[in-house]
Amino acid sequence: MTELREGEDVPAVAGLLLAAGGGRRLGGRPKALLTHRGRPLVEHAAGVLRAGGCARVHVVLGAAAQEVRARAELTGCVLVDNPEWERGMGTSLRAGLDSLAGTGARAALVLLVDQPGIGPEAVTRVLDAHRLGASLVSAAYDGVRGHPVLFGDGHWAGIATTATGDQGARAHLRQHAGELVTVECGDVAAAYDIDTEADLAHLE
């Protein structure tokens, strides 16, 4: 695993957007296609990763993938299909990390499509911690770990073996808690999820 030296640029960090969810508690409306600021939510989230400093962005699609491709402006993004999306977020995380093989990426910064309260500032703070040498970084909100989360490439294999259901990388993060650097972002972002009909009030 290669880590960045202080002051080095971060072109080898790929933004990894998990956008495959089917919105079961939203009546089956795919989260990627929810409207936020006049555009599909997936488009907004991809823009957050770019604005925060991720030059390469991979987007994992699942529910209504063809419609997402048709309606969202994702030019320049690598679109990754996850045919197993119904089995949970863990499958999307594995598919996204697999898609980075051979790209030269040395770290993946993971963001969820249904957290529009997290903007570029939080992405930049996590990237800055990586720039200082950390290979496992998480944003925190009032001390509680959240997204975005950055995984150096040395962690990818371990995540692939433990990411099941909707747990994502939680098991891996517990196993490597001593290596995890947390970066407080509660002053620049809000980590709410768009999971239920009531949560739709957060969209603009």
Image: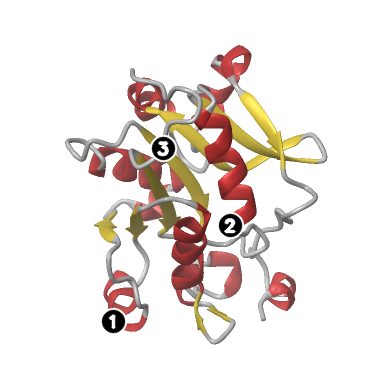
Q: Residue at 52% across / 54% down in the picture?
A: 52
Give the residue at mark 2.
120
Closest to the observer, 107 or 79? 107
Q: Earlier in the sequence, mark 3 or mark 1?
A: 3
Mark 2 falls on what kind of element? Answer: helix
Counting from the top left corner in percent of width and height, residue 193 is at 66, 59
- Give the number of the disc on residue 70: 1
Q: In this view, does 7 lie above or below 63?
A: above
**Residue flagged by tag 1: what amino acid is it?**
Ala
Tally the marks: 3
Q: In which quarter of the image is residue 118?
A: bottom right
- Give the number of the disc on residue 9: 3
Which corner quadrant holds the N terminus?
Answer: top left
Q: Is residue 115 above or below residue 109?
A: below
Front tag of 3 and 1: 3
- Give the number of the disc on residue 119: none
Mark 1: give few (<14), some (14-19) or many (20+) Cα within 10 Å.
few
Front tag of 1 and 2: 2
Residue 167 visible here:
no
Counting from the top left corner in percent of width and height, residue 147 is at 60, 45
**Residue flagged by tag 2: what amino acid is it?**
Pro
Residue 77 visible here:
yes
**Residue flagged by tag 3: what amino acid is it?**
Asp
Q: Is residue 103 above or below residue 52?
A: above
Which corner quadrant holds the C terminus?
Answer: bottom right
Q: How far apart are marks 3 and 1 (CA)?
A: 34 Å
Q: Residue at 43% across / 31% down in the picture?
A: 8
Give the colour scheme shown.
Answer: secondary structure
Horizontal relation, residue 130 to residue 86: left or right: right
